[in-house]
Amino acid sequence: MTGPSRKHLPILVASLMFLITMTNAIGRSLARPLDPIEGKWFGMAGFPQDRIEIGFEIKRNDRGELKVYLYEPVLNFYGLELPGVMIKQGEQYVLKEYQLSVTTKNGGLEGTYFGLNAPISLKRTDNLPSEVPVPDLPKGPGPKWQTKLGAGAIYASAAVRDGVAYVGTTGGIFHAVNLKDGSLLWTFPAGRPIYGEALATDEAIFFACDNGYLFKLERKTGKEVWRYDMGDSRVARILPHQSVFSFDYRAPRPVISDGVIFIGSGDGSFHAINASSGERVWRFESSAVDAGAAGSLPDFTGAEKKIRSTALINGSHVIFGSLDQMVYALDRKTGKEVWKKNTRGNIDSTPALVGDKLVVGNRNGLLVALDPTTAEVKWRMLFWGSAVESEAVPAGDLFYIGSSDLRRVSLIDPKDARVIWRTDVYGWPWGRVLVANKMLYVGVASATPYDMRHLGSFTALDRQTGKIVWRWPMPEWPGSFMNGFTASPALDSRTVVIGGLDGTLYAFPAE
């Protein structure tokens, strides 16, 4: 019998090397006893007002490093490999990249987790949770009508007044739409994309456009009255993308008080404009990030000076957030800075006054309540790594709010940030929740590919319980990264109207 031919030698050498590598790895594994932290763990994290289920699998990789895999149902992670490696420091095991620090105690793990050092308590387990299917939910009444508004998506929320919806698109056209049947009453060619909600008064329409102008139109005809240069026509905008985190899909809604329009700009300035003449009253320039940040959350996102947050008028103050991570309060008459507060996260949502507290969220997953006069922190709470793109909507003594990757609409007590209920709507509820008599209406956006499952829809929830009453899935279209609704729904009589990312304005029957 002859030996192997020359042509078989490379295969034999490769096989031998593989066997040697595997033998060495097995030998190292057998020589190294299991670390007491290795294995599967499950338990609870958070403060008494907001406790969540959480689990980890901790195991060594081929290099002998301790890797951590996250199971966090509230954030829809099931085996997510966390960055970095876990290191033993004295009695503690620390994953600094995710702010996880635990020690072994009575057969379990005790420690702190994520921002604000939330307490965590874990026990060993044989099984960790897995993602559950979306339930078969009623699809509801469906749209009464739907009107395609030309080319482009609808990111802006519609303003409704006297049976008419006013809304712009990324195609650069602003529309007045009859809410009875979806017919077009008039259109105005603004010339560049429109991302912000309009302000509708008795006589006029005001809206911001990406050509840098704030427009005033006659409400009945769409005829231009004046345009005001906000100075941001050259500011770049990056829409949501699977590989870009610092996306920018909003513009502020103008607000009016005592005949003056207040609005922020993409260049970091804030403007007060005479509503009749279009002349500037004053202009404020926002600052760079303050190094003396309040709070223990890390700055994950970096900062820009864009102002995409809609302002809140509170007495003599005008209050707004910025992508420079600050909340600002200015004197309404002069534009002089009264106070500013660093939240350590980009802010594009609108601050809301809930009782005696100013509630604002940021993209680092922080929701904070401030004293609106002094900016003193009343409480802070986590959205567990999810950005807070939505704004708080007061309802009696409580408030509703959407989120981002958390995929939840929440009902929260503003006294102490206690979560009363949270409901998974299976996608991004970025917009403002619409509060009706017995129902909540919310637009939901989706993205594919993404780290977790998202499904676009228009969804109705029971106000008291948070239970989904019906869910109308937005039909997906091939090749799109996003679909569904980023805009907020608006109510006029018994019709709810909302613009979709497919460029269609939809009208649904209200309760």
Image (spheres, grey):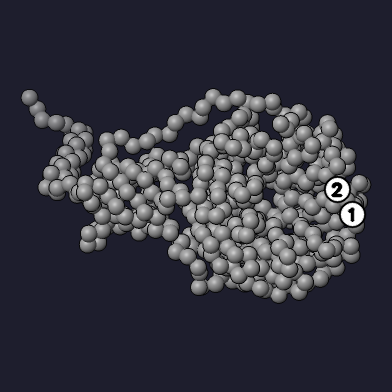
The answer to whether residue 271 is seen in the rendering is yes
Does residue 447 appear in the picture of this structure? no
The residue sitting at 69% across, 37% down in the picture is 437
Mark 2 neighbour class, 10 Å CA radius: few under 14, some 14 to 19, many 20 or more:
some
Q: Position of residue 285 (x, y in %)?
A: 68, 72
Residue type at tag 1: Glu
Left or right: 313 with respect to 224?
A: left
Provide the secondary structure element on which disc 1 rests.
strand
Q: Is there a contact, CB below 8 Å, between mark 2 and mark 1?
A: yes
- Tell me residue 184's x, y (percent): 85, 37
Q: Which of the 4 image quarters holds residue 113? A: bottom left
Q: Quadrant of the C terminus?
A: top right
Residue nearest the observer in this picture, 102 or 31: 102
Q: Which of 382 and 287 lies nearest the eye of the viewer?
A: 382
Residue displayed at 67% across by 73% down: 337
Residue for badge 2: 188
As drawn, the label of residue 98 is none
* Other-residue count near label 1 (Cα within 10 Å), few / some / many at <14 / 14–19 / ≥20: some
Under tag 2, what secondary structure? strand
Q: Residue at x 58, y 32 (%)?
A: 468
Q: Amino acid at mark 2?
A: Phe
Give coordinates of residue 492: x percent, y percent: 78, 39
